[in-house]
Image (tube, helix red, strand yellow):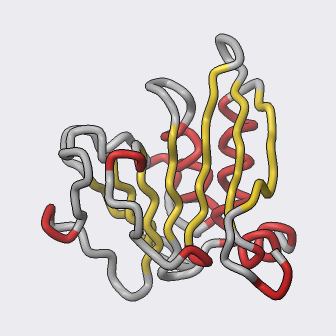
């Protein structure tokens, strides 16, 4: 990871015990977002991905109450004071799908967050612009959230 390498490494691991804690972690990451960034969310149904996105939206300066899972429409856009958050749910897309062929092309002032990211093509952005967030159930309201990314993300998240 020396010299700003884009190699992904574990940046943080948190156990959250409430929706508020999950949103708070998302907000911290949202404050670190820049246009062109991609946040890949992985985890089973009900693991807290959409809750995390509410926090991302708040951190990006968007209205968090508007955040809902875009399962049936594939994507939602949340314009914020800092940037637009494009929220994609890839659950209904074909394995290995390409977002552009599904009509999803974030604008210049947008960051992309993808639920069920494991279903999409691997390279949505350069590795230094990509943050992977893994969600694991630990109990009824308890989640283990693992952030993985490059040294660039480590620096940005550490500054928030």
Front in this rendered view, residue 90 or 32: 90
Left or right: residue 3 versus residue 114 is right
Task: Looking at this view, name the residue that lies furthest to the top.
Answer: 140
Front in this rendered view, residue 71 or 118: 118
Image quadrant in which the N terminus is located: bottom right
Q: Is residue 54 above or below residue 138?
A: below
Displayed quadrant of residue 130: bottom right
Taking the spot 77% from the left edge, 24% from the top edge, the residue there is 17
Q: Is residue 59 above or below residue 133?
A: below
Left or right: residue 18 versus residue 74 is right
Displayed quadrant of residue 94: top left
Label count reads 0
Left or right: residue 47 versus residue 96 is right
What is the x, y in percent for residue 114?
A: 42, 54
Q: Is residue 67 above or below residue 43?
A: below
What is the x, y in percent for residue 91?
A: 29, 39
What is the x, y in percent for residue 74?
A: 23, 49
Taking the spot 33% from the left edge, 75% from the top edge, the residue there is 106
Taking the spot 68% from the left edge, 17% from the top edge, the residue there is 141
Left or right: residue 66 versus residue 15 is left
Q: Is residue 105 above or below residue 23?
A: below
Displayed quadrant of residue 14: top right
Image quadrant in which the C terminus is located: bottom right
What is the x, y in percent for residue 144?
A: 72, 31
């Amino acid at each position: 990871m020396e010299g700003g390498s884009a190699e992904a490494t574990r940046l943080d691991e948190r156990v959250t015990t409430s929706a508020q804690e999950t949103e708070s972690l998302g907000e911290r990451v949202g404050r670190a977002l820049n246009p062109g960034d991609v946040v890949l969310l992985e985890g089973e149904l009900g693991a807290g991905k959409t809750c995390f996105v509410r926090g991302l939206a708040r951190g990006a300066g968007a209205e968090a109450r508007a955040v809902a899972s875009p399962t049936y429409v594939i994507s939602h856009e949340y314009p914020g004071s800092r940037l637009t958050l494009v929220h994609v749910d890839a659950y209904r897309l074909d394995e290995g799908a390409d977002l552009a062929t599904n009509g999803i092309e974030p604008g210049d002032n947008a960051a992309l967050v993808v639920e069920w990211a494991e279903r999409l093509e691997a390279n949505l952005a350069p590795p230094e612009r990509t943050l992977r967030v893994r969600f694991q159930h630990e109990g009824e309201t308890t989640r283990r959230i693992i952030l993985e990314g490059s040294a660039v993300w480590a620096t940005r998240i550490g500054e928030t």
